[in-house]
């Protein structure tokens, strides 16, 4: 479980906190959608969970361990992150993008890591991309590669920031099905403004509004509440 306790984040120079005393739990074996309008604090919240931002106050626990007390290697083994820009290394092939972290961060043998990477790509239906460079694959393929790279470290949790933003409707549908298969082994927290996608892929959700959690629970119920508010 990921547990957030009284989380506050305020950017330097801002008069008002971006995140305001957030407390929420993300249990294992679920896909959570983190919903909210632009500027509501979703990506800041994700960055705090990923420990790329240090909260102004409050605590974040993963499996009852405070992430502030974990080493970088311990945290990245448990928690994977894929941001909207994907951050694939353009000068490395897909295969090398996937093997770099296991080899350099965890000291895994390159030959064994390459074997695991090929198996991962094959399982995800993109084995033919192994020797291509990021500039030679589509946006949807790059999204899959970025997630596959994160899964190479076998994290318990994966954070995804707007994963469908660069995808067309057909590719979004394929990605939704693919994500459903992955949740067997990995729990996901997904930042998205795409309500149909959220309703299709996630069981539970959190709605942020002006840095505060205003709704939690089943995604369908949250979306119904949002749509009802809009139509009033």
Image (cartoon, rainbow, N blue to C red):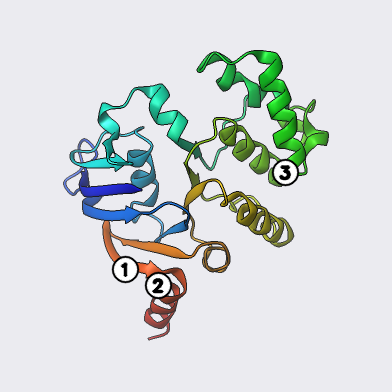
Residue 197 spot, x, y in % from top left:
57, 63
Residue tagged 2: 222
Q: Residue furthest right?
A: 128
SS category of the residue bearing label 2: helix
Quarter of the C terminus within the rendering: bottom left
Query: How far apart in space, not on screen, are marks 3 and 2 (Cα)?
Result: 31 Å
Foreground: 71 or 18?
71
Which residue does the image show at 38% across and 23% down from the upper left? 72
SS category of the residue bearing label 1: strand
Q: Is residue 213 above or below residue 118?
A: below
Q: Tag on residue 124?
A: 3
Q: Residues within 10 Å of mark 3 (few under 14, many from 20)?
A: some
Residue 111 spot, x, y in % from top left:
71, 15
The earlier-in-sequence mark between 3 and 1 is 3
Q: Is residue 72 above or below residue 124?
A: above
Can residue 163 be seen here? yes
Query: How far apart in space, not on screen, are marks 2 and 1 (Cα)?
Result: 7 Å
SS category of the residue bearing label 3: loop
Q: Tag on residue 215?
A: 1
Circle nearer the viewer, 3 or 2 = 3
Q: Residues within 10 Å of mark 1 (few under 14, many from 20)?
A: some
Left or right of 120: which side holds 77? left
The earlier-in-sequence mark between 2 and 1 is 1
Which residue does the image show at 61% across and 49% down from the upper left? 182
Which residue does the image show at 52% across and 67% down from the upper left? 195
Foreground: 35 or 10?
35
Circle nearer the viewer, 3 or 1 = 3
Left or right of 46: which side holds 131? right
Residue 1 spot, x, y in % from top left:
36, 48
């Amino acid at each position: 479980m990921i547990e957030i306790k009284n989380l506050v984040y305020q950017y330097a120079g801002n008069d008002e906190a971006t995140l305001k005393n957030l407390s929420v739990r993300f249990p294992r074996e679920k896909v959570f959608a983190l919903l909210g309008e632009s500027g509501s604090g979703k990506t800041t919240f994700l960055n705090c969970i990923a420990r790329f931002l240090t909260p102004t106050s409050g605590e974040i626990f993963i499996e009852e361990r405070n992430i502030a007390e974990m080493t970088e290697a311990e945290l990245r083994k448990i928690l994977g992150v894929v941001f909207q820009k994907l951050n694939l290394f353009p000068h490395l092939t897909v295969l090398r993008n996937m093997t770099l972290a296991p080899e350099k961060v965890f000291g895994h043998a390159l030959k064994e890591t390459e074997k695991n990477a090929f198996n991962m790509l094959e399982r995800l239906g993109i084995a033919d991309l192994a020797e291509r460079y990021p500039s030679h694959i589509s946006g949807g393929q790059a999204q899959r590669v970025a997630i596959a790279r994160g899964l190479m470290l076998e994290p318990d949790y994966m954070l995804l920031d707007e994963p469908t933003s660069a995808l067309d409707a057909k590719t979004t549908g394929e990605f939704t099905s693919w994500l459903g298969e992955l949740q067997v082994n990995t729990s996901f927290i997904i930042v998205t403004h795409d309500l149909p996608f959220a309703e299709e892929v996630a069981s539970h959700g959190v709605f942020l509004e002006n840095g505060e959690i205003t709704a939690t629970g089943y995604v369908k119920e949250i979306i119904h509440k949002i749509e009802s508010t809009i139509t009033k």
